[in-house]
Image: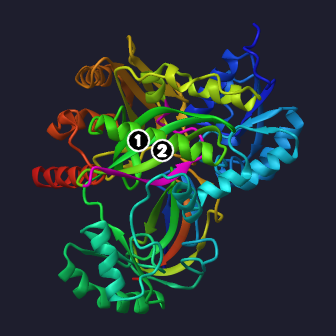
Amino acid sequence: MTSQGSGIKKLLIANRGEIAVRIIRAARDLGIRTVQVVSEADREMLAARMADEVMVIGPVQAAKSYLDIDAVLKAVSESGADAVHPGYGFLSESAEFARRVSELGVTFCGPDAATIERMGDKVNARTAAIEAGVPVVPGSDGRVAGLDAAVEVAERIGYPVMIKAAAGGGGRGIRIANTREELIAALPTAMNEARAGFGDDGVYIEAFIRNARHIEVQILGDGTRAVHLFERECSLQRRRQKVWEEAPAVALPDSVRADLCAAAVRLAEGVSYRGAGTLEYLYDMDREAFYFIEMNTRIQVEHPITEMITGVDLLREMLLIMGGEPLSLKQEDITARGHAIEVRINAENPDKNFFPAPGVLETLKVPGGPGVRFDTGVCEGDTIPPYYDSLLGKLIVWDRTRDAALAKLAGALGELQIGPKPTTASLHAALLMAPDIISGSVSTLWLEDWLATRAEDIRKSA
Amino acid sequence: MAITQIEAALPGLVFHRPSPEAEPFKAPGDAVAVGDTLALVEVMKSFIPIEAEVAGTFKGYAAPDGESIEPGDVLCEIEVSE
C-alpha cells in the first residue's frame, strides 16, 4: 500500500492502552511502520500485538518505563524510528522530552519544546492569550494595593468576586464576596489569613464564576496556519477528571461559539502552533462570557467526539503535519454535523467511591451499529494491570440530534458486556436517567453534587 | 508474643513512605496503634493507605519500597501486644 505522502516512515509510540492502539491505526492507514515501547507489564497488550515491532523499555513502574526519558530515547535510537508520538499523559507535555527527541534528529509529534513550556505555564499562557485578544478570567492582574483598589476592580468586573491569596494555591486562601459590603468586610480578614497561612498578605481579585461549563476547542496547526474543529463540552467531571464529554456544547449561543472558536485560532496562530491542541475555556452561564484557562499541547482522550461530528481523522492530520505537510484543511471545509457523546469506561467501582478494580477482564463484548465506536486497548481475557490509569475504553456514539445520541448511548451501554470487575459503565447508565443530563442542564459542579446525593441514597437504603 | 503478617489485598506498588523524601511510616521497634498507617499501595494512580488493625511493635517491611505486590503478598510484620 502506498502512503498518502507522510514524511514519517517509522513511528515510535511512547504510550500504552487505547491511545497507543489509536495511533497505530492512524499510522497503519498512512503506510507508516510502528514501534511500540512497553513496560514488562504490557508485553501482551493489544497495541503491542498490533505494532510492527515491540521493545521492552523497563519494569512495570511507569517512572522506570513510560516516564523514563532515557529509556524511551534509547529505544528511539535503537529502533531507527524517525518520529515519536507521545499520546496523552506520560511524556506528552514534557518540554525536556520534546527537546531531547528533536536533538536526536527525530520528529516529536507535537509542538516544539518552547511552545510546550510556554503554554504549560499558567502565567505565560495567560499572557499569550491576552496578547492574542483571547478573554481570560477577569481580575486584578496581580495584587491589589488596598481596599479602594479592590473595590474598584470588583465594580469593574462585577460581583460575585473571589479574593485569592497571592501565595495560596490548590483552592486554599479563597474567599467569595457577593456585594461591595461583603468585599469591604472580607478583605482585611482575607489579608490577615493570607499572612498567617502563607507568610504574605498579598491578595488579588478575580471574577467568581458560580455557574460554569467546561468548554474546549480543538485546533490543528502547521506552524503557520491553524483551524478549529469546533468545541467539546466536558462539564461532567469528578475530581477534575472528565467522565462524560459531548460535542457540540448544547448551551452555547451560536455567536459565543463563533467567538470562542475564532479566539482559539488566533491564539494557536499567535504562538505558531504545530500539531493538535486544545484550548480550555470556562463558560460563565450567568455572564454569558467565556474565559481561556489553559492549553493542552497534545491529543486528548475525548478527541473522538470531534472526529464524529466533523469527519476529520485528527490523528491522521497530526501525523501528516508532523511529517512536514502543510495543513490540508481549510476552515470553510470543516463543518459540524449532528451530536456525539463519549463516556469513559474505567476500571473503578462507582458504588464504592470509585475504588480501583484491576484484574482479569473475563468478558468484553463491544457494542456496534452505525454511529457507535468503542476505542480500547484491551481484549477479552486480558489482565488489567494495576500500575497505570484505570481507563479501559471509551464508548462513543453519534446521531443526528442530541436526543437521538442519548438514546443510542442507552442502547450501546445495554449491549456492552464488561466484567466481572465493576466499571463506570453502570454509572453512565444511571446518569442517562437523570433529568438534568437529559436536558443538558449541567455545570462543572453538577456531577460531584449528584454523586454525593446518590451516595447518601445508597447509604439510607442499605 | 505472636507475629501478625499484614498481607496485601490488592495488586499494585507498595510504598513505605508518604512521599519519596519523607521518612518511612514505621521503623523496626516502633509502637503500632490500631489505625496507624503502615504503608501505601498505589493502584491505578490511587494511593490506598494500609492501616494497622492490631496494636503492637513494628517488626519490619517484607515487600521492598516502590516494588510491585500481588494480593496475599506480605507487606510487613507486627509483633502483637497482649
* Residue A7 in the figure: left or right of residue B80: right
Q: Which residues are magenta?
A: A287-303
Q: Are marks 2 and 1 in contact (CB under 8 Å)?
A: yes
Whether residue B13 sits left or right of residue A102 in the image: it is: left
Secondary structure category for the residue under label 2:
helix
Q: Disc 1 designates what residue?
A: A259
**Which chain hosts label 2?**
A
Question: Residue A263 has which mark?
Answer: 2
Give x and y (percent) for residue B34: 38, 77
- In reply to whether residue A300 is colored magenta, the answer given is yes
Question: Is residue A319 left or right of A378 when viewed as pictured?
Answer: right
Is residue A97 shown above or below A424? Answer: below
Q: Residue furthest top?
A: A1
Q: Residue at x 63, y 71 (%)?
A: B20
Amino acid type assigned to the residue bearing label 2 in the image: Ala
Q: How is the image coloured?
A: rainbow
Q: Amino acid at mark 1?
A: Asp
Q: Nearer the viewer, residue B33 or A5?
A: A5
Residue A346: percent from left, percent from top: 42, 40
Q: Is residue A244 visible?
A: no
Rendered location of residue A271, percent (x, y) = 64, 48
Could you say which is closer to the camera, residue A108 or residue B78?
A108
User: Residue A232 falls in which quadrant of the image?
Assistant: top left
Q: Quadrant of the C terminus of chain B?
A: bottom left
